[in-house]
Image (cartoon, rainbow, N blue to C red):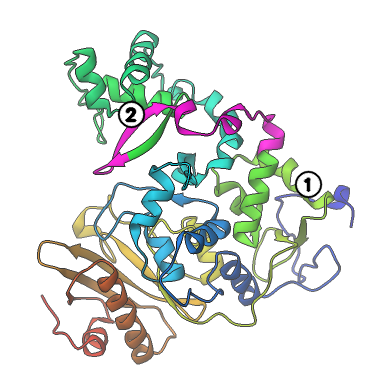
Amino acid sequence: MTVSNLVVGGTWHGSTVPISSNGSAALTVAAARRIALGAQGFATARPSGPPTRRALAKVLDNTKLLQIDSVSAVVRAHYTPVFSRIGAYDRALLDEMSWSDSARRPRKLVEYWAHEAALLPVEDWPLMRWRMVKYRHGRWAGLGRHRDEKLADEVLSVVREFGPSTAGEIEKHLELDRPRAKDHWGWNYSETKVVCEQLFASGELSVPKRVGFQRHYDLTERVLPAEVCARELDEADAIRQLVRRSASAHGIGTETDLRDYYRLTRVQTEPAIADLIAAGELEQVAVEGWDKPAYLHTAARTPRRVTGAALLCPFDPLIFFRARTERLFDFHYRIEIYTPEHKRVHGYYVFPFLLDGEIVGRVDLRADRTTGVLRVPGAFLEPGHDEAYVASELAAALREMADWLELDTLEVGTRGDLTSALSKAARVRVSA
């Protein structure tokens, strides 16, 4: 089939089983799921010894990025996908790869807006230049918030003189005491912080380090290698490379899947997909039950089976696009952090539980570092799965997480149909 015969991102029509572009019958959802899990590193054996920087780099080879989020109910979101794939590791390794730089151990990851705030490989930073142009006035410029150019120049001057600084430190250098707006439910940033974020979004500032999760801003040319800063690509080439990375991370996905990974638009992704098909890097295929064509990365493998257990944080790249999660796993999942407590179905910070290639349950988790307890306020079994087996494997996974987080005790609450079996498997009492 030639590229001209393809309808990129379209919808299948008719009642017959769709045929892939190579003439073969549609893939089963189970096969698509194994491809996706293999692409994300869940079919790869864990390291035999303590994980090293090399092991973490292999995770990033698969995921391409790690989403950053401020919620710390269990552990910061960027740490957990690594744990889910290789088990307990020293989080300082990821900190060092992201927020430290030396001749012996150069920085490997850098922050930018990819799939929301994210850590991505340093060499991928130039692929976001088109977005930096779009974000010259920040991510929310479309809402009419243009940057204060005078204050932006002052911020850059302070950073140039004093080096990596928080927004608060910059304010002190500028001797500013400006009131913070109270007209938004979110962060209520000061004007200086807003400008720092705008300069970060436009690529003029970067983040060489975090302390207590606070961003320290510095000039991008002092954070990234000169050759990375100097690299220029036109938007079409950058988008094509981003879609290539997205396809590799997915293994198989629809146009909307490939688009969402880096928050692209359909207008951007469709030509890129067509180019990659023409180059032999993607193949249009059909998946049973999917109403849109899928695109298979030609280097993707289909594991015969996927075994093992993993707790998935809400921002894990495997599941952060909820529509794809439902298509692949028949698992309806919504984060309920911003849902009033009395309206929550499963809990505040819920981890899906992946077992032998399927999502078989979910647990609401909270790490109480003061008392050294990993709390499980709620545990829920997905229909059609063996309660005793799931509870046993989940108990082991929770113990592993507790050990990784240096928490001494596991405590199971009362919400959900899996709590009784889980408490028995974990040999702990149910706690109200």
Is-magenta flag for residue 97? no
Residue 137: x, y in percent?
A: 45, 20
Q: Is residue 368 visible?
A: yes
Amino acid type shown at disc 1: Ala
Residue with the mark numbered 1: 274
Classed neighbour count for the residue bearing mark 2: other residues with Cα under 10 Å, few (<14), some (14–19), many (≥20): many
Residue with the mark numbered 2: 164
Where 337 falls versus 365 (above or below)? above
Judged from the image, the secondary structure of the residue bearing numbered disc 2 is loop
Judged from the image, the secondary structure of the residue bearing numbered disc 1 is helix
Residue 335: x, y in percent?
A: 35, 57
Q: How many marks?
A: 2
Based on the displayed image, in which of its 4 quarters is residue 226 positioned?
A: top right
Horizontally, residue 20 falls left or right of residue 294, namely right
Residue 159: x, y in percent?
A: 34, 21
Residue 259: x, y in percent?
A: 60, 47
Point 67% across, 74% down: residue: 302
In the image shown, does 407 or 105 lie closer to the viewer? 105
The magenta stretch is 210-238
Is-magenta flag for residue 225? yes
Q: Is residue 115 visible?
A: no
Picture quarter with the N terminus: bottom right
For residue 215, which numbered disc appears in the image?
Answer: none
